[in-house]
Image (tube, helix red, strand yellow):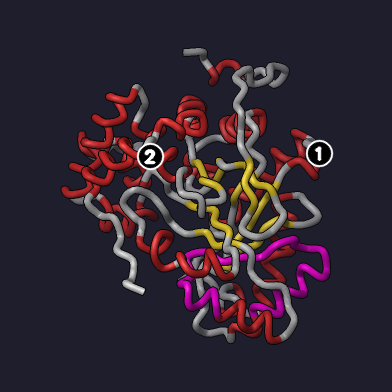
Amino acid sequence: MENFEQTYQNRGIKFAKKYNMEYRRLGKSGLQVSEMSFGSWITFGNQIGDNTSENLMAMAYDAGINFCDNAEIYASGKSEEVMGNILQKMNWSRDSYIVSSKVFFGIKGLQDSKPTQKGLNRKHIVEACEQALKRLKVDYLDLYFCHRPDKNTPIEETVFTMHNLIQQGKILYWGTSEWSAQEIMEAHMVAKQNHLICPTMEQPQYNMLVREKVEVEFAQIFKTVGLGTTIWSPLASGILTGKYSKGMGDDFRLSREELSWLKDRNVVEENLKKADKIVALANELGLTAPQLAIAWCLKNENVSTVILGASKLSQLEENLKAGEVKNMLTAEVIEKIETILQNQPKHPPF
């Protein structure tokens, strides 16, 4: 395999591998987003160095990825600072890429933030937006997500604030992350009643092990409001690669203290056994397990984009090939996957 780590140390060398990146509409909006996107959670300003971050973003952009995902809470704001420095250095045309931020937790997290430094109240949403713009070194955010629902703030206040930010040109689209279908529809109801701009997209977790929300709970609102999705954790934080079956390495994502909640929930014997079988099936198809898992997500027509995370160029190079092989997932292959997973959600009988 070509040494991409060495290649990208020389900024004069472009990523040679070309992909036929496909683009999908973000819900019912006219915005075209690459079917695979790039996220900086855990990695930027935290797990990897800035040079590696730069090389990863360069590889992603050269491969046709046009959406980079971020949030105020990621590395306490450092993730956005790193990404902003890269965007400034690369000097890519601003109309060629999409960048996001998310608001709710504050940069210090819920426990360490003061009441006005978190949540979805007007004060925090507006101030967090301004801070994200400065860290990312951009004049506007393409996508701005409410990172979690806020039980302490009236939904009307949040919807009005997001609408006003769009009217001011500080954001272009707003959406939600890890909201329920009911909460999303409440936002739509408030927006329609007051002639405001509705949320465009939701960012849920979706992978072979976590399916209920995307496949069942959101099924109706995909039809009614044309919800776009920017799904995270297509590899179930690495479980679907099969590597956790061999033990918990210090460099594994779920070994990190801040992800203990995900480890406790997902690193269980049943999931590890399923992952081993997915690895075996991928090998039969001449694929890697990550490629199979990502391609499986791409086969869902309600997925607007799959957010890829990587700490190494070789990982990103491997995962990018999922778009090329998704057509290998025939009905027969999907049936084999379902036999392994045994977790296909049941739709209501109406």
Q: As drawn, which residue projects farthest toward the top?
A: 2
In the image, 63 versus 264, the foreground residue is 63
> What residue is shown with label 2?
293
The 10 Å Cα crowd at callout 2, few under 14, some 14 to 19, many 20 or more, is many
Specify whether 75 is left or right of 161: left
Callout 1: SS: loop
Q: Residue 166 bears which disc, if any?
A: none
User: Which of the 4 image quarters holds residue 210?
Assistant: bottom left
Query: Can you say whether 315 is above or below 80 in the image?
Result: above
Name the residue: 29% across, 25% down.
283
- Magenta run includes residue 195: no
Name the residue: 38% across, 39% down.
293
User: Which of the 4 image quarters holds residue 21?
Assistant: top right
Residue 304: percent from left, percent from top:
56, 51
Query: Can you say whether 215 is above or below 40 in the image?
Result: below
Mark 1 / mark 2, whichever is N-terminal:
1
Residue 66: percent from left, percent from top:
67, 41
Which of labels 1 and 2 is toward the front? 2
In the image, 305 versus 317, the foreground residue is 305
> What residue is shown with label 1?
93
The 10 Å Cα crowd at callout 1, few under 14, some 14 to 19, many 20 or more, is few
Q: Magenta span covers which residues?
A: 158-185
User: Which of the 4 image quarters holds residue 226?
Assistant: bottom right
- Magenta run includes residue 174: yes
Query: Can you say whether 184 is above or below 272 in the image?
Result: below
Callout 2: SS: helix
Query: Can you say whether 265 is above or below 254 in the image?
Result: below
Q: As drawn, which residue projects farthest toward the front?
A: 350
Q: Label 2 amino acid? A: Ala
Q: Label 1 amino acid? A: Ser
